[in-house]
Image: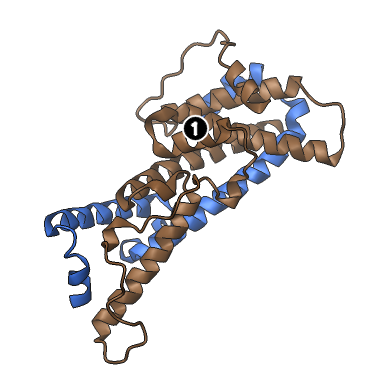
Amino acid sequence: MSSRRSRQQSSSSGSSSISDDQIIQLVSKLRQLVPEIRDTRRSNKASASKVLQETCNYIRSLNREVDDLSQRLSQLLATIDADSAEAAIIRSLINP
Amino acid sequence: MILDLCSSSRAHTPNMTPIIPTANNPASATKLRFARRFLRSLSKMSKTRPSCPSSICVKKRSEGLKMAAYWCMARSVGSRRAWSRAILMKLSRGRQQHPHHHNFSMKRKIRRPTWLGKTKKKQKKKRNITCSSSSYDDEDEEEIMKRQTEKLREVVPGGKLMDICSLLEETAHFVTCLADQVHVMQTIAHRYS
């Protein structure tokens, strides 16, 4: 406890308490975005470090997904007639 | 070449009635903009197909498609977000960085997160048994947070230059947009498979 206070002496105590609240708010925002945490019953109890860890894992899995989809789409490229299908795809995005 | 394909897609505007997202549907304006841009890039790419069917060509094409996807998403968000600016800057330099290697940062020293304070010395050792259990837990938790924050900086484009608040905000927006990008690509792949 005393070590934490001594670390905060260099910055003004007012600004550090405001940014702590902001951080808590932003972490809870991330909590809602990451499916691994949002869908568990203990979502409100997940610690900030757990939220950050799951966020990193989620971003990495999304990047892998983009990789796989890029490979699939490059194979399907010959069959894609994007001009005529644009309206249909946009419509299916709006009405899932 | 890929950037030319993406930028030239702006010139071609098909006669489409504008689709305005309503309050009920989950597709944001950014997602729809991305879908349009990406489809036009795909259309252009399918017309300029290389003749060689070798695995190297296929791999290059897949890489190009991936870069095009990130480029289109960053363009759809525009320059109002630090992460989209970082992607646009990185890709416009023509580097062939792979996103899954998480190397979106510019080459600078990693800044210590500001919320941890500015002192460089650690006050207590980790394994010091004379520490009270609460300060030991605090030290552990802060070390873990610091490590996780550094990892997050590596995966978020432009993350290494941000303070913790901006990093968390940018991460939230980046995660939303990346999930949208994946959903659009899945929709297109599903339609054509």
The percent coordinates of residue B156 (x first, y second) are 46, 48
Query: In the figure, is residue B57 to the left or right of B65?
Result: right
Residue B67 appears in which quarter of the rendering?
Answer: top right
Q: In this orientation, does residue A37 appear?
A: yes
Colour assignment, chain B: brown
Image quarter (top left, top right, bottom left or bottom right) of the N terminus of chain A: bottom left
The percent coordinates of residue B66 (x first, y second) are 64, 37
Residue A6 appears in which quarter of the rendering?
Answer: bottom left
The percent coordinates of residue B2 (x first, y second) are 66, 27
Please report, as a chain letter, where disc 1 is located: B
Q: Nearer the viewer, residue B16 or A95?
A: B16
**Residue farthest along the top direction in this orientation:** B15
Q: Nearer the viewer, residue A46 or B93?
A: B93
**Residue farthest along the bottom direction in this orientation:** B129
Query: In the figure, is residue A39 to the left or right of B41?
Result: left
Q: Nearer the viewer, residue B137 or B122?
A: B122
Q: Residue at x 63, y 45 (%)?
A: B98
Q: Nearer the viewer, residue B116 or B134?
A: B116
Colour assignment, chain A: blue
Q: Is residue A1 above or below residue B30?
A: below
Amino acid type at image mark 1: Ala
Q: Is residue B166 above or below residue A6?
A: above
Q: Is residue B100 above or below residue B76?
A: below
Q: Residue at x 55, y 49 (%)?
A: B103
Q: Residues within 10 Å of mark 1 (few under 14, many from 20)?
A: many
Query: In the figure, is residue B57 to the left or right of B135?
Result: right
Q: Which residue is mark 1?
A: B74
